Amino acid sequence: MSEPVPYPLLLAILATVVAILFAASLLTGVSGIGVVDGISALFYPAPGQDAVALVMREIRLPRAILGLATGLSLGLAGAVLQGYLRNPLAEPGLIGVSGAASFGAVLAFYTGLAGWVPLALPAMALAGALIAVLLVFAIAGPKGGSLRVILAGIAVSSLAGALVSLTLNLSPNPFAAYEIMFWLLGSLADRSMDHVAIAAPFMVAGWGLLALTARSLDALTLGEDAAASLGVHLGRVRLLTVVGTALAVGAATAVAGAIGFVGLVVPHLLRPLVGAQPSKLLPASALGGAALLLAADLTVRLAAPDRDLKLGVITALIGAPFFVWLVLSDRRAAE
């Protein structure tokens, strides 16, 4: 299938959009800081700009970095999972990583660790994501194919969801339940450079592992048997896919909460533009995911600046109509 847009041009456009949205994220907020003052305070604060520099460096910069990194993680992981599982409905939550990370964070709230040790929340969410990987491999077995990985992931995701519901049901006070529910909706507000520091190494490691699957995913479009005959080690691809997703998406969930649909929507929208070639879809989806999440976060801040509108709500409002469009398109193609 030919590319309707030259691939280098597509990446350049996506990278430009991401850069613009990142800059807009840095310069948007309720504090009313001007563009020139904000930029100067970020890099070279003048005398008397201590408050402005604090806002730019400790509030807006971490939020923009996490929006970029989280969107990149979700978009890249979604593209890899859809290529590996050869399922257009696959997304990071399918293998239980998001659900298990959410349960780890919920435990941090329930036990009170989130209040005593601020970084306990992302640490326990990351631990939950890594435990999910171990469970998926234990259930699927050492030679489990893509279908068994899907079934194992669904089982882990369902278990994590049930445990989250149980924790909410047993929550010792309504304030803890309130905090849990709001965290589960996803947000980038009130994040610091400490959150960036704890999540970034895991995200970067995850990106590296997921990027190594590119050539193998191209071969897998011919089927597992044909890919194996071409020298693709299916067990290695599965390991890279699941562990890479756990690291990247687990770290993203640890600092931003449960944010859905980005890993599903972005690869679908960009696949026709890259000629349906998985290796080309990976960087495009990574940039597209970053752009979508940064745009959603800007929408949160601009649409309701005086309300604590959650990021996961915006992405769900984008994803639900997309699902309807997907079903209608499939129905028209079948008729």
Image: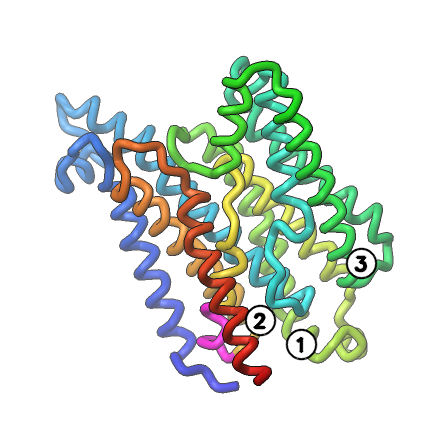
Q: Is residue 271 magenta?
A: yes
Query: Looking at the image, do the residues carrying marks 2 and 3 touch, with CB atoms under 8 Å apart?
Result: no
Classified by dominant secondary structure, the portion drawn in magenta counts as helix
The residue singled out by tag 3 in the image is 148
In three-dimensional space, the C-alpha distance between marks 2 and 1, rounded to whole angstroms, equals 8 Å
Q: Residue at x 47, y 46 (%)?
A: 70
Left or right relative to 146: residue 64: left
In three-dimensional space, the C-alpha distance between marks 2 and 3, rounded to whole angstroms, equals 22 Å
Q: Which mark is residue 221?
A: 1
Q: Count neighbours of disc 2 (C-alpha within 10 A) and say few if under 14, some if 14 to 19, many if 20 or more.
A: many
Please identify the quadrant where the C terminus is shown.
bottom right
Amino acid carrying mark 1 in the image:
Thr
Q: Residue at x 50, y 80 (%)?
A: 275
Over which residues does the magenta segment extend? 269-275
Say what secondary structure mark 3 lies in. Answer: helix
Image coordinates for residue 82, horizontal then vertical, percent: 62, 64
The residue singled out by tag 2 in the image is 278
- Image depth: mark 1 or mark 3 in front: 3
Say what secondary structure mark 2 lies in. Answer: helix
Image coordinates for residue 295, horizontal then vertical, percent: 34, 51
Q: Residue at x 52, y 16 (%)?
A: 115
